[in-house]
Image (cartoon, helix red, strand yellow):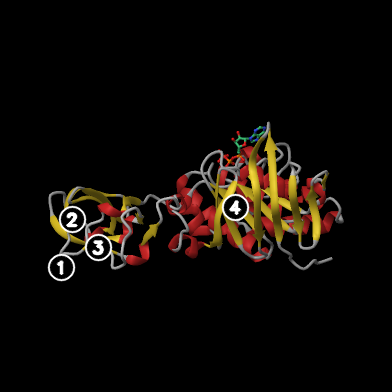
Amino acid sequence: MTLAPTPLSAQDVSRVYDGLAVVSGVSLDLQPGAITALLGGSGAGKSTLLRLLAGLEPVDTGKVCLGETILSEPGRTLAPEKRRIGLIFQDFALFPHLTALQNVGFGLANLPKDEARAIATQWLSRLGLGARSGAYPHELSGGEQQRVAIARALAPRPAAILMDEPFSGLDPSLRGTVREEALDAIRAAGVPALLVTHDPAEALESADHIAIMKLGRILQQGKAADVYLKPQGADIAAALGPVNIIAGHDLPAGLLKEAIAPDAIIVIRPEGVIPDATSPVSATIVSSRLTGPMARLVMNVGDLQLTSLVPRALSLPAGTETGIQLDPALSFMFASGNS
Ligand SMILES: Nc1ncnc2c1ncn2[C@@H]1O[C@H](COP(=O)(O)OP(=O)(O)OP(=O)(O)O)[C@@H](O)[C@H]1O
């Protein structure tokens, strides 16, 4: 039976431990065929929210729904194994005594043996592991084990996929490739998918939607580019990468066109601070470091210090006097209470 993909949603859910709400009135819609990254610092409540969606924890308020079906509400939690939700964790959690093929086939026990084997083989091939189906977990690299875990989660045609830091245990040289292949397979499955991460670069590179979580609440959610380019507060802007934060009254005149309230907070992404010899606002480069494809320049602008990220070819050595301008699309102004 093929079921039409439906959204998985948390509706005003809360979870309280020892009198403290670690998830507090959260609503989140996970749309079929899209990856939603749940991003936030340590202790923000990300894993707890995932556990509420998975049915590993009961909700204290609100509901978890798959389409119109209620999966959790206070006093009633449909068991995780009855939700048709695939879970992928950082530690792979493969059965050590089963081969890759048997691990993937584990969730297909309700199908005839031949059919289960064919589906499991298909998923392993799809994730580039066709030749390793007889290997045991200890014979596989971390990246291969995680691909098996992803194949195992997808093989039973889940209604949704929930991932908790699934790529953070992988070697950085492998991480990008495994992530891309895994998320492509998950997107192609057309089901709602949540990716819990504390890595803003991972969220921006991989996700269609981003939800920023802090102190048990979702501060902003939306399309990844919208959250990056239209943050609704300084802390949201900072959650997506390092930023320059300046009091409005410290910003030199002429750098932004709009009128700046003296008590405003100005947040500027480093790639929005652009050396420009023709600008009347002058800066002195105090340090210059190549960080990969981009160079990080720290500069003094009067009493102010700003960090700029520029492509390597536009880098300037320490000691250079230059002008600067700000990219208005990467510069945000907030009222001082909105941090
Ligand atoms: N079973 C529990 N009992 C009591 N407190 C808990 C329990 N589980 C989590 N917490 C607390 O809830 C808060 C949120 O934890 P959670 O693991 O959801 O955060 P997180 O955003 O996933 O953090 P991290 O990125 O560090 O994993 C933390 O302060 C944690 O100590």
| Residues at marks 4 and 3, CA–CA distance in whole angstroms | 38 Å
Circle 4: residue type: Leu
Query: Considering depth in this image, is 11 or 295 the residue closer to the camera?
Result: 11
Marking on residue 316: 2
- Which mark, by number, is residue 255? 3
Compare marks 4 and 3 and give the one earlier in the sequence. Answer: 4
* Residue at x 36% of width, y 62% of height: 330
In this orientation, does residue 235 appear?
yes
Q: Nearer the viewer, residue 339 or 64?
A: 339
Find numbered disc 4 in the image and state the secondary structure of the residue it sits on: strand
Q: Which residue is mark 4?
A: 195
At mark 3, the secondary structure is loop
Ligand 1 occupies quarter: top right
Residue at image mark 1:
278
Which of 47/282 is in front? Answer: 282
Q: How would you rate the neighbour count of disc 2 (Cα within 10 Å): few for under 14, some for 14-19, many for 20 or more?
A: many
- Residue kind at label 2, given as amino acid type: Leu
Q: Earlier in the sequence, mark 2 or mark 4?
A: 4
> Which residue lies most toward the top here?
18
Residue 148 visible, this angle: no
Of the numbered discs 4 and 1, the one sitting upstream in the chain is: 4
In this view, the mark in front (3 or 2): 3
Query: Where is 83 relative to 187, above or below?
Result: above
- Is residue 158 rendered to the left or right of residue 186? right
Quarter of the image with the N terminus in it: bottom right
Label 1 CB, ligand 1: below 8 Å?
A: no
- Alpha carbon separation for disc pair 4 and 1: 44 Å
